[in-house]
Amino acid sequence: MYLYCGNDPVNSVDPNGLDPRVKHPGGHHVVPQAIFGKAGLSEEAYNYFYHATTGPVEHCYDADHRRYSEAVQKMWDKWLHEQGIDPKKMTKAQAEEFVRLVLHSKEEAIKVYLTKLAKAQGISLKMLRKNVLKNVTAKLEEIAVKTAARQGVKGLGKKALGFLGRRSGILAIALFAYDWYTGGFRHACEELAWPLSELWGGD
């Protein structure tokens, strides 16, 4: 009956009522989302914590995960207090510092759970630590490149519109001068106003 939570209904939860183990695309967040998600972080700090994951691994909120989350929460509260950090102003470097502290923590609950996840991936705890830092760096670089590309395209579009606008203005002046030269000032004014008169007088 309680297969969905590993036969441990007291310490586990059932996210969707179907699967005993949930495989998240990015894996386990080194700093649980329940901690950083409600902290009101700066965008750069939030993004770092969000992408600081172990890589794909099946896990659920079992007793070990609960103890891990509680231990990281205590670390988080102590670290913010001792460092005098305002979450809203937290930098990417500070976020990375805390992730490293968690990864290398000697707190039993943290080390036990990270070791458990490493074994589930068939790697050592040392390799898991390296993978987390490598993956988050690669992901943030990918995001930065995409953002720069989007901004570049947007900037190019604005420049193109500006260029066309200037050329259109120059063309209008040239045509007005030609009409004035060939038919006089009144003719030039009539030609200039012709599109509008067509719109107003159209059926």
Image: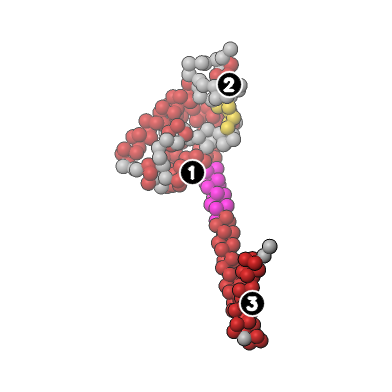
- Residue type indicated by callout 2: Gly
Residue that sits furthest to the top in the current view: 1
Q: Is residue 99 visible?
A: yes
Name the one closer to the observer, 151 or 197: 197
Residue that mark 2 sits on = 17
Residue 203: horizontal and vertical position, in percent? 68, 62
In magenta stretch: residue 143: yes
Q: Which residues are magenta?
A: 134-148
- Residue type indicated by callout 1: Asn
| Depicted 149 relative to depicted 69: above or below | below
Residue 201: horizontal and vertical position, in percent? 65, 67
Cα distance between the residues tagged 1 and 2: 29 Å
Residue 59: horizontal and vertical position, in percent? 55, 27
Residue that mark 3 sits on = 191
Cα distance between the residues tagged 2 and 3: 73 Å
| Depicted 182 relative to depicted 38: above or below | below
Residue at point 48%, 21% (across, down): 63
Left or right of 107 in this view: 202: right
Q: Main secondary structure of the magenta part?
A: helix
Q: Quadrant of the N terminus?
A: top right
- Residue type indicated by callout 3: Glu
Residue that mark 1 sits on = 47
In magenta stretch: residue 133: no
* Total tally of numbered discs in the picture: 3
Residue 36: horizontal and vertical position, in percent? 43, 36
